[in-house]
Each structure stands twice: as C-alpha cells, then as structure tokens.
Image: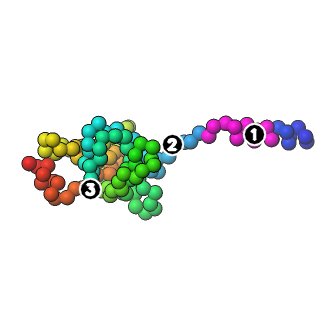
Amino acid sequence: MRFLISASLLVIVISLLLPATATADDWNRATTAIFNNPVRIPGQVLPPGIYVFKLAQIWGDRNVIQIWNADETVLCAQIFGWPDYLRRAPEGSHFVFDEGPKGTPLVLKAWIYRGNSHVQTFNYTKKLQNERRR
C-alpha cells in the first residue's frame, strides 16, 4: 500500500514538473503577419511591423477580426470581415492585397486561414474604392 501511494505521488510530481504542451486551437485562427510596408485596413493604416490576426472571442459572430501587436499586448484594430468561401481549403494561411495608386499603402483585401474554406474579406468606403481606380 505504501508503495502505491509513493508511486502515485511520484507520478504527480513528475507530471507537474514537465512542461505543458498546448495543442493547436483553430478556434481563433491566430495568424502572424510581417508587413515590411504600410498596409491599409478598413479605417486605418498599419505601419510596418509584426501583427497577429485573430477571430475575436465573441460567441455567435465569427466575422470580427482583432489585430494585435507582435506580443499580443496591444489591440491595434478590431474590424469586421465579410464571409466568402473557397471551393478548396488552402494548405497555408495567407493574405490577399490590392494595389492602390502609386505611393499609397497596399490594401488588405482578404485573410485566408489554412485548412479552412471560410475567407474573411474586407470592405472599404466608396471613397477609397474610387481612389484605387484612378
């Protein structure tokens, strides 16, 4: 009996000392982006830097995107995405950009998460859409 108690305590102590391993959670679809140039998102322009895109933890609405700084301590933006769908889910995450007039930032058009055919697209004001056509 004493042996079983000692062995159980040893297993508990060892499990507490081992580092925790986290499994990937696709719920928030966290994606890190490195922008070398300014990038326009709805409502503002992000300066060059590292950003983390995530779906907000809001039940019932999977189209609110939060954009955090690299270490996720500052919320840089919270924007709405419009759902669109792909026929085939991509193997990797990526962003789709549109070029504006020369000398203006790239415009973020969509965020596509790996293994998911649900795409977040971004809509802009008519004014910006007209500027891009020039």
Residue 8 percent location from the top left of the image = 80, 41
Alpha-carbon distance for marks 3 and 2? 31 Å
State whether residue 21 is above or below residue 45. above
For mark 3, does the 10 Å Cα neighbourhood hold few (<14), some (14 to 19), or many (20 or more) residues? few
| 35 sits to left or right of 106 | right
Which residue position holds label 2? 24
For mark 2, does the 10 Å Cα neighbourhood hold few (<14), some (14 to 19), or many (20 or more) residues? few
Which is closer to the viewer, label 3 or label 2? 3
State whether residue 41 is above or below residue 11. below
Residue visible at 73% across and 37% down?
14
Residue 28 percent location from the top left of the image = 45, 50
Residue visible at 37% across and 44% down?
51
Which residue position holds label 3? 43
Residue range of the region highlighted in magenta in the rendering: 9-20
The residue sitting at the right extreme is: 1
Residue 7 percent location from the top left of the image = 82, 38
Can residue 15 be found in the magenta stretch?
yes
What secondary structure characterizes most of the magenta part? helix
| 44 sits to left or right of 102 | right
Kind of residue indicated by mark 2: Ala
Kind of residue indicated by mark 3: Gly
Q: Are dots 2 and 1 in contact, CB under 8 Å? A: no
Quadrant in which the N terminus appears: top right
State whether residue 96 is above or below residue 75. above
> Which tag, 3 or 2, sits closer to the chain's start?
2
Which residue position holds label 1? 13
Q: Nearer the viewer, residue 1 or 90?
A: 1
Residue 6 percent location from the top left of the image = 85, 39
Can residue 93 be found in the magenta stretch?
no
Kind of residue indicated by mark 1: Val
Q: Secondary structure at mark 2?
A: loop
Q: Are dots 1 and 3 in contact, CB under 8 Å? A: no
